[in-house]
């Protein structure tokens, strides 16, 4: 994953573990590009209806296994926030494309 303006992001290969159209959930494992800091990075993203028909709640979590004393993957969390904000800006720019 490469995110402009976010330091420490690198290209990565990912394997989709779960794509659940019913529960709007995506789970994947980063299989290449994790570097030497983590032996496992497995994000899960779930979208649920918001308080009204024009809102959606996105929940992002990550299972990870650090190598050594490494803490949580903060760069991945920051990248996810940027991606969700970009998605939100795109969707809000033309709601007629998805609101029927």
Image (cartoon, rainbow, N blue to C red):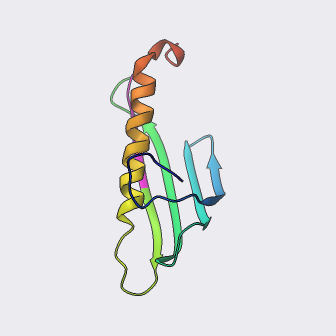
User: As displayed, is residue 42 above or below residue 6?
Assistant: below
* Left or right for 40, reference 66: right
Residue shown at the point (57%, 50%) measured from the top left: 26
User: How many numbered circles are shown?
Assistant: 0
User: As displayed, is residue 74 above or below residue 19?
Assistant: below
* Left or right for 44, reference 52: right
Residue 33 counted in the magenta span: no
**Residue 86's spot in the image, x, y percent?**
42, 35
Nearest the viewer among 85 and 60 is: 85
* Left or right for 64, reference 26: left
Q: Is residue 50 visible?
A: yes
**Residue 83's spot in the image, x, y percent?**
44, 43
Nearest the viewer among 6 and 99 is: 6
User: As displayed, is residue 15 above or below residue 90?
Assistant: below
**Residue 8's spot in the image, x, y percent?**
42, 61
**Residue 98's spot in the image, x, y percent?**
52, 19
Q: Which span is picked out in magenta?
A: 54-60
Q: What secondary structure characterizes most of the magenta part?
A: strand
Nearest the viewer among 92 and 22 is: 92
**Toward which corner of the image does residue 27 lie, by quadrant?**
bottom right
Residue shown at the point (39%, 28%) measured from the top left: 89
Residue shown at the point (63%, 59%) measured from the top left: 14
Q: Is residue 53 visible?
A: no
Residue 58 counted in the magenta span: yes
């Amino acid at each position: 994953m490469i995110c402009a303006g976010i330091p420490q992001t690198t290209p990565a290969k990912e394997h989709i573990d779960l794509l659940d159209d019913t529960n709007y959930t995506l789970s994947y494992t980063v299989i290449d590009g994790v570097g030497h800091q983590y032996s496992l990075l497995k994000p899960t993203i779930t979208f649920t209806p918001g308080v009204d028909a024009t809102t959606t709640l996105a929940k992002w979590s990550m299972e990870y296994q650090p190598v050594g004393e490494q803490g949580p993957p903060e760069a991945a969390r920051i990248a996810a926030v940027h991606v969700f904000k970009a998605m939100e800006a795109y969707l809000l720019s033309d709601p007629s494309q998805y609101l029927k």
